[in-house]
């Protein structure tokens, strides 16, 4: 079986883990002599540099919950009113940015599903204390967190699979033997590979944000 067909089979088989699909894709990137594709594969495998721009599919909408209290009354899962956040902190109330290696996202999503729980990304404590209880008269906030559905993490994984599949199919249409290229040869002209890559992988670029560095599991 050709490398392109191996990639296509792996990308469409859910039992094949995404890291294996990506490693096959890295071989293709080297044989195509297209470093931009290799860089994307490496970032998915090893994680993105924190604070760098992310692909849009790694930016996930969220809701925010918190622990607020007043005179001995505690509300441990209160909805946090994020409209009170200043403009430079709005991202904490709108989305979570995932920089982790894709294998870590798979593991977190599976652990959460097995435990019938959710994922949470804690707000910085100073942010929670200052803004978490806004809108709740007389309450103070002891902590706040972003709530992320495990299905959103699996959606990131599926998007990566789909893009690899689409890219390999378009490359195959140009040259079915591209995956077997001899080192030092160019199986498809670089400008053509670049066009296919740009059309397959790039949409609008996610904004730089500081949230989403780590996540933990929260049991329901």
Image (spheres, rainbow, N blue to C red):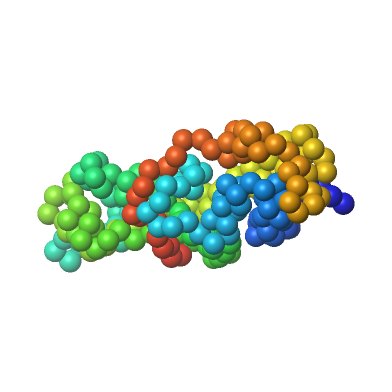
Q: Residue at x 71, y 55 (%)?
A: 27
- Depth check: give the residue in front, 71 or 118: 118
Q: Is residue 162 left or right of residue 150?
A: right
Rendered-image quadrant of the C terminus: bottom left
| Residue 212 position by quadrant | bottom left
Residue furthest front as drawn: 184
Give residue 101's position: percent from left, percent from top: 53, 60
Give residue 10's position: percent from left, percent from top: 75, 52
Q: Residue at x 30, y 58 (%)?
A: 123
Give residue 13's position: percent from left, percent from top: 75, 52
Q: Is residue 52 left or right of residue 149?
A: left
Counting every numbered tag in the picture gives 0
- Depth check: give the residue in front, 95 or 208: 208
Relative to 198, is 66 above or below? below
Q: Residue at x 12, y 54 (%)?
A: 138
Relative to 189, is 46 above or below? below
- Depth check: give the residue in front, 163 or 127: 163
Give residue 167's position: percent from left, percent from top: 68, 40
Q: Is residue 116 visible?
A: no
- Depth check: give the residue in front, 104 or 113: 104
Q: Is residue 39 visible?
A: yes
Q: Residue at x 46, y 65 (%)?
A: 217
Relative to 38, is 197 above or below? above
């Amino acid at each position: 079986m050709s490398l392109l067909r191996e990639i296509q089979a792996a990308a469409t088989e859910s039992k094949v883990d995404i890291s294996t699909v990506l490693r096959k894709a890295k071989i293709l990137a080297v044989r195509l002599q297209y470093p931009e594709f290799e860089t994307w594969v490496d970032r998915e495998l090893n994680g993105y540099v924190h604070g760098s721009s992310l692909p849009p599919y790694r930016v996930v909408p969220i809701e925010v919950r918190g622990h607020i209290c007043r005179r001995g009354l505690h509300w441990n899962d209160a909805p946090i009113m994020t409209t009170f956040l200043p403009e430079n902190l709005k991202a904490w109330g709108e989305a979570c940015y995932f920089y982790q290696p894709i294998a870590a996202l798979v593991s977190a999503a599976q652990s959460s599903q097995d435990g019938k729980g959710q994922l949470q990304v804690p707000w910085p404590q100073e942010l929670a204390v200052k803004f978490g209880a806004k809108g709740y008269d007389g309450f103070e906030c002891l902590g706040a967190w972003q709530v992320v559905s495990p299905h959103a993490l699996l959606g990131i994984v599926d998007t990566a699979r789909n893009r690899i599949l689409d890219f390999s199919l378009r490359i195959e249409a140009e040259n079915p033997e591209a995956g077997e290229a001899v080192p030092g040869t160019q199986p498809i002209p670089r400008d053509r590979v670049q066009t296919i890559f740009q059309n397959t992988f790039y949409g609008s670029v996610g904004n730089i944000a500081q949230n989403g560095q780590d996540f933990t599991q929260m049991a329901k």
